[in-house]
Image (tube, helix red, strand yellow):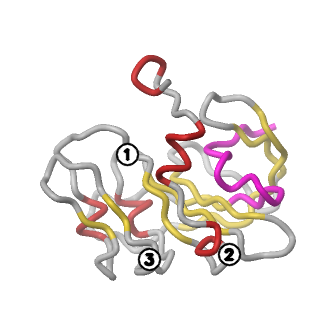
Amino acid sequence: MLPIDGIPTTEDILAKAPPAERMKKGAVAMIECWQEIPCNPCVVSCPTGAITMESLTAIPQIDFDKCIGCALCVAACPGLAILLVDSSKEDGDRVSIPYEFPLPEVGETVDCLNHEGKVICEGVIEKVVHLPAVNKKDKTPIVTIKVPKGYALQVRFFKRR
């Protein structure tokens, strides 16, 4: 349970997840911000106004229909709490995460981890990008991992072999 051990339940995750039909249309942001803190870089970085907050300390909300999957919010979030999920391709799902460690190589096979840090599947690094910075502090690379179908909502990190 999130308040006790910091690990979100399946219900917590599904409450933040984009609808399956939206994920089938292409990459879409998923915000796993669990606490009310004074922070809004995701709102400022979103070019379509898809991310909103009722106040500076409110948990960000996303209009999945407005999200274009650009990943600017992923790079801008100082809490590394935003990722992109994509179920539009036949050969597997894609998960794009902020990554602040030595960068992997495209094509590298990795062990994919869930919220608990447990290996749940194998993935392949598909893309490593540095997005144009919204401000000078936004330098977090985005790593896209190809994972088996059905794993987009479960994979949250990876371990290099």
Residue 45: name its quadrant.
bottom left
Q: Is disc 1 placed on a helix, strand or loop?
A: loop
The residue indicated by pointer 3 is: 67
**Labels 1 and 3: the sequence-earlier one:** 1
Q: Nearer the viewer, mark 2 or mark 1?
A: 2
**Labels 2 and 1: the sequence-earlier one:** 2
The residue indicated by pointer 2 is: 24
Q: Is residue 71 above or below residue 9?
A: below
Amino acid type, mark 3: Cys
At horizontal 58% and vertical 74% (from top left) the residue drawn is 22
- Quadrant assignment for the C terminus: top right
Mark 3: give few (<14), some (14-19) or many (20+) Cα within 10 Å.
Answer: many
At horizontal 71% and vertical 58% (from top left) the residue drawn is 145
Residue 31: name its quadrant.
bottom left
Q: Nearer the viewer, residue 10 or 123?
A: 10
Mark 2: give few (<14), some (14-19) or many (20+) Cα within 10 Å.
Answer: some
Q: Alpha carbon of mark 2 to alpha carbon of mark 1: how far?
A: 23 Å
The residue indicated by pointer 1 is: 33
Q: Is disc 3 placed on a helix, strand or loop?
A: loop
Q: Is residue 45 left or right of residue 118?
A: left
At horizontal 31% and vertical 68% (from top left) the residue drawn is 51
- Residue 9 x %, y %: 56, 33
Q: Nearer the viewer, residue 99 or 17?
A: 17
Amino acid type, mark 1: Cys
- Residue 77 x %, y %: 35, 54
Magenta segment range? 145-161
